[in-house]
Image: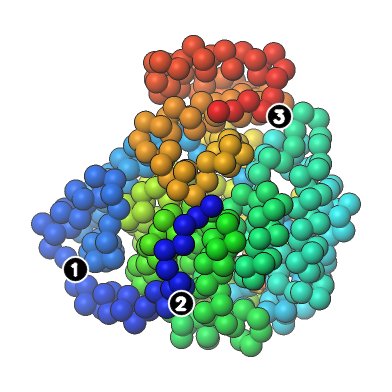
Amino acid sequence: MLSLTSEITASDAIHPEKIQAIVDRQETADKVRVRECIARARTLKGLTLEETAVLTSVQDPELVQEIYDAAKYVKHEIYGKRLVLFAPLYYSNYCSNNCLYCGFRRDNPQPRRKLTLDEVEKETRCLIDQGHKRILVIAGEDNRKSSFRYLLDVIERVYRVRSGKGEIRRINVEMAPMTVEEFVELRSMKIGTYVLFQETYDPEVYRRMHPPGPKADYAARLNAMDNAMEAGINDVGIGSLFGLNDWRFEVLALLSHAQHLEQRFGTGPHTISVPRLEPAECAPMAIQPPCPVSDADFKKLVAIIRLAVPYTGMILTTRESAEMRGQLFDLGVSQISAGSRTSPGGYTEQQEETAQFSLGDHRTLDEVIADIAAHGYIPSFCTGCYRLGRTGSDFMDLAKPGLIRAHCLPNAMFTFEEYIRDYATPATAELGEQTIERMLDQDVPWGIRAKVTKVLDRIKNGERDIYY
Ligand code: SAM
Ligand code: SF4
């Protein structure tokens, strides 16, 4: 359980005007100062708001490259060559909010649908049959059409589904803010991470983007993670929707949010997501983003987040193109979605007219996995930490260089071997076996190689779900 060190919640601890002041007074920093900040980041201790602001001001291509090199170093020291994979499961697109950037907004005359539990099961089966083990359950916010109780039913049903040799082993949840009591119930369903994006940490921009409706309450959204952690959910995931506001401000605000959670609960967020606005039906701000983020700035902000909060996982979704995703693996991303659909029923019915937004990466899970292996990484479906209770600060303790290599890399190899045996196309299977062999030789610590080889053999002989 988390130790609560203060009663101060995020809405009191995070000061947008102070963050804005840091952004405003940050001129282009001189080379010496920038290099000092990069050198500090290489010690894996993270960065202060001021140091992070220095890096956001960098324009000089030589210094930008040094930021990238440092991000790559930090990424590899802490996360090694592992990339965790998941898929979203949308079960309802009813929404009582009117967020100006979202295809689910209530003013969009798109067809609305809430999946029945049998349909949820069908979608789950389809994801399991592709090889997925981790999903993110998502829906619009509409308490009359799709209640909190229904969310619990959906989770229960997903965990019960078995198909072939597979099952979903970890459900993360991305859903509107809840009360502490509701979070306690949600926690009892054995969820992994609770995810919620603030969208923008600027209260004025937030007000403009969110017409009246439950989501219009900026402070309630900001305090959702405090409620979740008070309820004992150790792993929470924060995020900003890039494109709504100046990305420099949002990066500092995300860091400020992470610092608040760390101070109050002794552990920061488990993940930070970096969604970037995509076109969406009938959503003016998605069609013309108020503060578009260029590809160059997007790469920079991913690398800076990696340096500022080295032990926090970073999530990138199929909003981004295959090419951009490939480049961001090296700069700090540690989890990606693959083979995603953003409409309820999208996996079994391939329909697009009820989608939340359009995707940048349309490849299948197998194609994404082949690409990950071709980039020298290893895909992971591991759910070991959360099932062994290594969450929150226990996970952060584990996430020290060396330890990840001893636990997470072998677990990634075991789940990849399962994927190869049960789901891979012949070409991906061949590439996968070569990847596992190479990692066994080059990356697995010498002392545990024999043990890892033994487990791989057990999986080749038909055993499943082995982790440590
Ligand atoms: N309704 C809940 C909420 O708003 O938090 C749960 C999930 S909502 C479907 C998931 C996230 O999608 C939002 O938090 C927002 O950041 C993101 N999103 C909405 N419209 C988007 C768009 N056009 N492009 C990219 N991401 C978008
Ligand atoms: Fe509804 Fe969430 Fe979309 Fe806003 S972002 S319209 S709350 S689904």
Q: CA distance from mark 2 to mark 1?
A: 30 Å
Question: Residue type at mark 2?
Answer: Ser
| Quadrant of the picture in which ligand 2 is shown | bottom right
For label 1, the residue is: 28
What mark, if any, has residue 81 been given in the picture?
none
**Residue 82 appears in the figure:** yes
Nearer the observer, 211 or 158: 158
State which quadrant residue 50 falls in: bottom left
Which numbered disc, 2 or 1, marks the residue that appears first in the sequence? 2
Q: Is residue 332 above or below residue 424?
A: below
For label 3, the residue is: 423
Q: Is residue 142 above or below residue 324?
A: below
Q: Is residue 370 above or below residue 427?
A: below
Nearer the observer, 80 or 368: 80
Rendered location of residue 78, percent (x, y): 37, 39
**Tag 2: Cα neighbours inside 10 Å, few (<14), some, or many (≥20)?**
some
Rendered location of residue 16, percent (x, y): 38, 79
At a point 79% along the width and 69% down the height, the residue shown is 146
Rendered location of residue 425, percent (x, y): 68, 27
Question: Residue type at mark 1?
Answer: Thr
Q: Is residue 235 above or below residue 439?
A: below
At a point 83% along the width and 66% down the height, the residue shown is 113
Look at the numbered disc 1 and say if its residue's Cβ is closer than 8 Å to ligand 1: no
Question: Residue type at mark 3?
Answer: Tyr
Mark closer to the observer (2, 1): 2
What mark, if any, has residue 11 been given in the picture?
2
**Residue 251 appears in the figure:** no
Nearer the observer, 357 or 49: 49
At a point 75% along the width and 66% down the height, the residue shown is 148
Rendered location of residue 373, percent (x, y): 51, 31
